[in-house]
Image (cartoon, grey):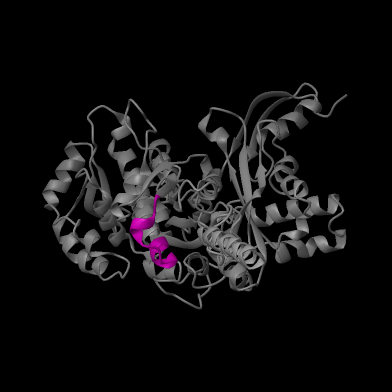
């Protein structure tokens, strides 16, 4: 069973850290359902 | 032949009242949480103009300190004395807010900026005393209007107020009753951006020694859009700012791409010059009122001064090869493409490792990298980390992965090939370009042989794509003004003279032989 199986996930990525789409791929691979994903910029 | 970087201008303007009234963190807070503790506490954390002069990253930005000198001081810097506290530096200046308001009025050609007459009378002599400000610019200063008239525009006509030391001293009027693109809010942002570009252009022209009339093309790469309801981003900031700066021989265009735009614009300028389309192109940008105080909540929470109280601006002159100045090498171009992917490793590979590899170079062959040079004093307390350092760690790690750097050398990579960030968090302003002025000097002096400028942009913020973007290019020492364009006029004359001489000799020989 994957780590995030059955979990709904909200992703806020950081443009200068790990961006949303990259986290999204990891979360999906871990079995999560991504309900929202975006990348924000603080600089 | 490759184009060269002939000079640059870098300017800052202090904007404490604009932090309160125009920064989107604050304007949003006023809407969603008008009684918040943050809004009450914020004014106590604003810096005086003298404090912004006494701040090392600002002195680096205008060229009074080098990035290396800044790196020798332990962080944080906001509570330290700067060794220099000057308004003027070799690249530009730090302009006080009141003078910048006057420059905004000067930059306005539609009578949209109205300043109170006593304020104008007070500030005008000080702006006139600025050595970069020309008589033609001062001739554009209006006398000002009464306090009642300013209040009328603000209270009854939808004008955006301008404050100095919390006192209403003027306004920016709307240019249309209905069109939101010509609202007072948008026009204030646009005119502030334009004024910053004008000031940067003036310094770029002065520092590079070019005749203003010889500038043929200007490319603006800021992040604002000017236009009306029928063409929202119609432009053209570049030509508008060139007009005020007296660049009578120039036309221009706006290049947009979020924070990546300055690097896109530099590549465009270098291409135009290398192609022979234009001899002298300036890449320019003013600053961004919306980003003032962007991370203010964290700064107030940590009892720090509001460090995002500076608007930035820069301008770089790209010219045909003079055999002296550093060149822009267009063979080594990094591009984040649609298919690149968004992981940090994929991004840095596309911008750094791949273009170098295509040209038979290693990551360690580049002496200095200039990615995003945000000041860590601003970003670290806000939880965004040290942005330049994070970039250097990733570049170094890629070098190790490619076998170009020993793992034990990784720790020293950021210091050896990197720079400590000093630029304000004004989006496009810190993106790659802050180092170009220093890089030109460092290459000319032989301190370094080359540098890579890297621009990255958050395209997803515009909600048109989820993609990220980035481009990079390399500046290198001049390889000499070898003329590869064919045979020169002198050479043709010399060849013809030699041929005629040979022919004459032949004739003489034949004559003697007879």
Q: What is the x, y in percent for residue B459?
A: 56, 35
Q: Nearer the viewer, residue B379 or B87?
A: B87
Residue B167 lies left or right of residue B224; in this view the side is left
| Residue placed furthest toward the front | B514
Quadrant holding the N terminus of chain B: bottom right
Q: Is residue B303 visible?
A: no
Residue B61 lies left or right of residue B397; in this view the side is left
Q: Nearer the viewer, residue B4 or B78?
A: B4
Q: Residue B477 appears in which quarter of the rendering? A: bottom right
Q: Is the magenta region chiefly helix, strand or loop? A: helix
At horizontal 33% and vertical 57% (from top left) the residue drawn is B213
For residue B248: magenta? no
Q: Is residue B186 above or below residue B296?
A: above
Q: What is the x, y in percent for residue B219?
A: 44, 46
Q: Is residue B77 above or below residue B400?
A: below
For residue B206: magenta? yes
Q: Residue B177 appears in which quarter of the rendering? A: top left
Magenta part of the protein: which range?
B203-216
């Amino acid at each position: 069973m994957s780590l995030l199986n059955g979990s709904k996930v909200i992703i806020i990525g950081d443009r200068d850290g790990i961006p949303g789409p990259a986290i999204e791929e990891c979360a999906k691979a871990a079995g999560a359902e991504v309900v929202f994903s975006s990348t924000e910029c603080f600089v | 032949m490759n184009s060269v970087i002939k000079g640059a201008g870098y300017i800052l303007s202090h904007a404490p009242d604009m932090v309160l009234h125009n920064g989107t963190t604050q304007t949003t807070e006023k809407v969603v949480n008008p009684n918040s503790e943050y809004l009450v506490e914020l004014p106590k954390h604003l810096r005086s103009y003298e404090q912004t002069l006494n701040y090392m990253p600002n002195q680096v930005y205008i060229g009074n300190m080098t990035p290396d000198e800044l790196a020798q001081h332990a962080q944080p810097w906001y509570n330290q004395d700067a060794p220099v506290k000057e308004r003027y530096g070799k690249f530009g200046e730090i302009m006080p807010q009141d003078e910048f308001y006057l420059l905004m009025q000067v930059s306005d050609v539609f009578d949209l900026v109205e300043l109170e007459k006593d304020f104008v009378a007070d500030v005008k002599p000080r702006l006139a005393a600025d050595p970069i400000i020309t008589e033609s610019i001062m001739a554009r200063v209006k006398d000002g209007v009464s306090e009642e008239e300013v209040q009328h525009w603000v209270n009854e006509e939808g004008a955006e107020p301008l404050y100095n030391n919390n006192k209403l001293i003027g306004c920016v009027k709307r240019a249309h009753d209905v069109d939101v693109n010509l609202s007072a809010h948008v026009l204030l942002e646009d005119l502030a951006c334009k004024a910053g570009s004008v000031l940067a252009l003036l310094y770029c022209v002065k520092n590079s020694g070019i005749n203003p009339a010889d500038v043929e093309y200007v490319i603006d790469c800021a992040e604002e859009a000017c236009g009306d309801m029928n063409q929202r981003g119609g432009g053209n900031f570049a030509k508008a700012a060139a007009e005020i700066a007296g660049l009578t021989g120039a036309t221009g265009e706006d290049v947009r791409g979020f924070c990546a735009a300055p690097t896109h614009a530099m590549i465009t300028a270098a291409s135009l010059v290398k192609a022979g389309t234009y001899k002298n192109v300036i890449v320019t940008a003013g600053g961004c009122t919306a980003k003032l105080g962007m991370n203010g909540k964290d700064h107030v929470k940590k009892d720090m001064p509001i460090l995002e109280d500076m608007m930035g601006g820069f301008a770089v002159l790209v010219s045909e090869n003079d055999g002296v100045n550093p060149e822009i090498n267009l063979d080594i171009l990094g591009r984040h493409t649609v298919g690149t992917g968004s992981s940090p490793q994929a991004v840095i590979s596309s911008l750094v490792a791949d273009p170098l590899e295509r040209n038979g170079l290693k990551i360690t062959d580049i002496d200095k990298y200039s990615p995003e040079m945000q000041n860590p004093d601003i970003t670290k307390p806000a939880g965004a980390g040290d942005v330049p350092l994070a970039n250097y760690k990733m570049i170094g790690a890629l070098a190790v992965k490619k076998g170009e750097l020993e793992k034990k050398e990784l720790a020293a990579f950021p210091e050896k090939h990197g720079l400590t960030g000093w630029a304000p968090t004004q989006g496009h302003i810190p993106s790659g370009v802050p180092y170009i002025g220093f890089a030109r000097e460092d290459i000319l002096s032989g301190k370094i042989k080359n540098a890579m400028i890297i621009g990255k942009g958050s395209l997803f913020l515009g909600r048109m794509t989820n993609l990220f973007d980035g481009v990079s290019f390399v500046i290198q020492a001049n390889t000499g003004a070898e003329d590869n364009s064919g045979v020169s006029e002198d050479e043709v004359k010399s060849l013809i003279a030699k041929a005629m001489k040979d022919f004459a000799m032949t004739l003489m020989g034949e004559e003697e032989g007879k």
